[in-house]
Image: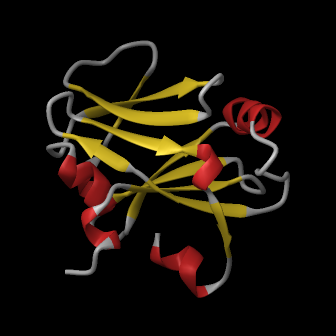
Amino acid sequence: MKNNVCKPTILIDTKKSLIRIHKQTLYMLGSPAYVELLVNPEKLYVAVRTSETRTNFSHKINWSKLCGKNSYEIFSKILIARLINICEKLQFVGSYKIIGNYSFDENIACFDLKKAFEISGEDYEKI
């Protein structure tokens, strides 16, 4: 396996206002029923945390709809606008890949917004 495949990965698409969580990241998190996105605006971190129950902040993973897809998408104009406001690296028209770290003890994937890098074309479709 390539090194990047073993690392949690997300894509932030500012033009389409969505966050794509790579399917491998979801498997790493134990194939959860729900995920929550956490943002630390001071440290410029985004985290994906699992949840087995529905909350006001969770997103249900429909595993049957993920067949044949590489990622789970969360659409949010408000979240993307706020991420752009807190991180000057993100622009309003771009797609940014972030390779993060997985904490086995806490079962959480963390992503440093400062390490986001812009991608396009073929790389975008792989996420």
> Measuring 65% from the left and 37% from the top, which residue is drawn there?
76
Judge from the rendering whether residue 47 lies leftward or rightward of residue 114; answer left or right. Answer: left
Rendered position, 56 above or below 106: above
Q: Nearer the viewer, residue 67 or 74?
A: 74
Locate residue 60, reporting x and y percent: 34, 34
14 over 105 or under it: above or below: below
Q: Nearer the viewer, residue 5 or 53?
A: 5
Q: Position of residue 114 (x, y in %)?
A: 64, 48
Q: Look at 64% across and 64% down and name the residue there.
A: 117
Residue 113 picture quarter: top right
Total marks in image = 0
What residue is drawn where x is 23% and y is 18%? 53
**Colour mapping used in the image:** secondary structure
Query: Where's residue 105, x and y in %?
Result: 14, 30
In the figure, is residue 56 to the left or right of 41? left
Residue drawn where x is 77% and y is 51% of the image? 89
Instruction: Provide residue 16's location: percent of width, then percent of height.
Output: 72, 55
Residue at the extreme bottom of the image, as rendered: 122
Image-based side of 86 in relation to 53, left or right: right
**Placement of the N terminus among the 4 image quadrants:** bottom left
Of residue 124 and residue 7, the one placed in the foreground of this image is 7
